[in-house]
Amino acid sequence: DYVVVKMIPDNRLPPRHLHSVHTGKTFAVIKWESPYDSPDQDMLYAVAVKDLVRKTDKIYKVKSRNSTVEYTIKKLEPGGKYHVIVQLGNMSKESSMKINTVPLSAPDALKIITENDHVLLFWKSLALKESSFNESRGYEIHMFDSLMNITAYLGNTTENFFKVSNLKIGHNYSFSVQARCLYSGQMCGEPATLLYDELGTGEDSSAAKSGRSTDVAAIVVPVLFLLLVTLGIGFVVLYMRHRRLQNSFTAFANSHYSSRLGSAIFSSGDDLGDEDDEAPMITGFSDDVPMVIA
């Protein structure tokens, strides 16, 4: 035997398992479950979104018969903080959660150029990759002095460059540029940071290393080129001198070559004089000695 029991739905219960599915810069996707399983009629929910920064409220109405409800909250601000409340339309018990939207991205290609008594910071416009960013909002610049362990606010600008003066020799600085913070610094963009290790380098740490490598290469390459040219000239001079010595020796050897002996004969001047004195003088030939002509 069995019996079927149908529970009476309690519309005073709060929505269950309220959570965030995905959060972007200007939207947030939230999801929750109905107060009880398998609703047999459409249920009207009230979604209240409280802006904790601007101190404003918005209420959205959502109607659904599904046990699981998914809703996208739009027109949010990057870097904002929100308090979301979901309850049935009859003002039953509520479920709530907090959402922080994704802040604006950091500016790209932050570079520094060193002048005589100041430096210039340059970066790409954030509007090129952030459709929700307006150039009129501008950027703010901060500087951290690692030697003094002090962070200073340098100011803001609507341009894509900023002049920094009064830097101290021997101090290491870190510059950061970000979308200007709104509402007392509560809604800021992500900062782009540049390390300035040596006064006058005008580069970040990685760029400074690359610059120093370039400077070394600019010195080493000409020196190596001069060494190669010098070695080449030396080899040519040695080769020409060797050819001259070889030609002189060949001419000298040919002038002392004896075709009868098949070799060259070299002797000193004294030896030549002695041989002439000791050699017998040929006066003539005898008739009874045959002459052989080869």
Image: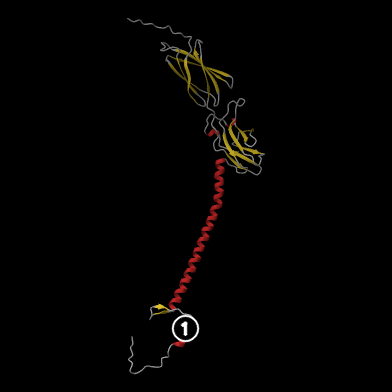
Above or below, 242 relative to 287:
above
Residue 261 picture location, percent across and down = 38, 80
Instruction: Identify the residue at image location x=47%, y=82%.
Output: 271
In the image, farthest residue toward the right: 166
Left or right of 291, for residue 18: right
* Residue 207 relative to residue 253: left or right: right
- Of residues 145 and 279, the one drawn nearer to the viewer in this rendering: 279
Mark 1 residue element: helix
Q: Would you place residue 251 above or below residue 58 in this image?
A: below
Report the coloring of the rendering: secondary structure
Q: Quadrant of the C terminus?
A: bottom left
x, y percent for residue 99: 52, 22
Query: What count of labels does the image hold?
Result: 1
255 vs 85: above or below: below
The residue under the point 57% across, 35% down is: 193
**Point 55% across, 23% down: residue:** 81
The quarter of the picture where the N terminus appears is top left
Residue 179, how many percent across, how many down?
58, 31
Q: Residues within 10 Å of mark 1 (few under 14, many from 20)?
A: few
Q: Position of residue 108 (x, y in %)?
A: 54, 36
Which residue position is annotated with label 1?
272
In this view of the protein, which residue sits in the foreground, 78 or 125?
Answer: 78
Residue shown at 56% from the left, 52% from the top: 219
- Which amino acid type is shown beneath numbered disc 1? Leu
Left or right placement of residue 94 versus residue 263 in this view: right
